[in-house]
Amino acid sequence: ETGVTQTPRHLVMGMTNKKSLKCEQHLGHNAMYWYKQSAKKPLELMFVYNFKEQTENNSVPSRFSPECPNSSHLFLHLHTLQPEDSALYLCASSAGLAGGDRTDTQYFGPGTRLTVL
Amino acid sequence: EDQVTQSPEALRLQEGESSSLNCSYTVSGLRGLFWYRQDPGKGPEFLFTLYSAGEEKEKERLKATLTKKESFLHITAPKPEDSATYLCAVQARGLSNDYKLSFGAGTTVTVRA
């Protein structure tokens, strides 16, 4: 148990559906992340929020829409997805340090396995 | 652009057979190198952070080392419960408050009893 929870754990949706993924962190962190993990590929960073402000959008298609209402919650709204969007979607959080040479360890949730039919 | 390459892609070991995983990286300035363990259907679990060449860290049967170009994860006398995918990631030093991680594709380790 890392202190980062994700719901649902599994999701099957059609290409015309709208659904949302939820992430919650109980670590008192200030930064939250969405990643996409496809088989045999490195984790792909999708979005970064630091102190509730989006600081990174890694050229993600507009059919993925993030929302961060506070530093403990992160959502990923999905609509009109494609079959190639099927993957494991991981949420992570970190302290979000203020710069310098210190590292910022990310802690991951269990992921949502998404299947788009 | 930061690059992380892990080898081998898959490793099958007999219980007790020690081995090493490699993570080669190219980064403009290394802030930290991270190792994670990922079990099937789960999220990555943090193992170690290494900050500078020559540094070593240990946890049970795992030992991570770092040079200026690569990191090794040594598994000593592995047990079946060490079976997992091991991920390497680098965090680069930059001018902004940028703590992005660049991940390798991972090494899947299978330990047979």
Image (cartoon, coloured by chain):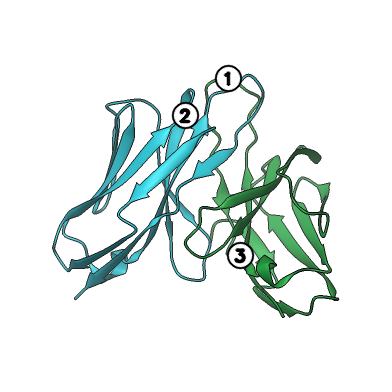
Question: Which mark is first along the chain, 3 or 1?
Answer: 1
Labelled pair 1, 3 in contact (Cβ < 8 Å): no
Q: Chain of mark 3?
A: A
Q: Chain of mark 2?
A: B
Query: Which quadrant of the structure image shows residue B52?
Result: top left
With respect to residue A3, does A7 lie above or below?
below
Display colour for chain A: green
The residue pinned by badge 2 equals B27
Q: Amino acid at mark 1?
A: Gly
What label does residue A100 carry, if any?
1
Amino acid on which disc 2 is placed? Val
- Tag 2: Cα neighbours inside 10 Å, few (<14), some, or many (≥20)? some
Question: Disc 3 designates what residue?
Answer: A111
| Left-right relation of B70 to A75 | left
Q: CA distance from mark 2 to mark 3?
A: 28 Å
Can you tell which chain is drawn cyan? B
- Whether pointer 1 and pointer 2 mark residues with C-beta atoms closer than 8 Å, the reply is no
Q: Residue at x 40, y 28 (%)?
A: B51
Q: Nearer the viewer, mark 2 or mark 3?
A: 2
Q: Secondary structure at mark 2?
A: loop
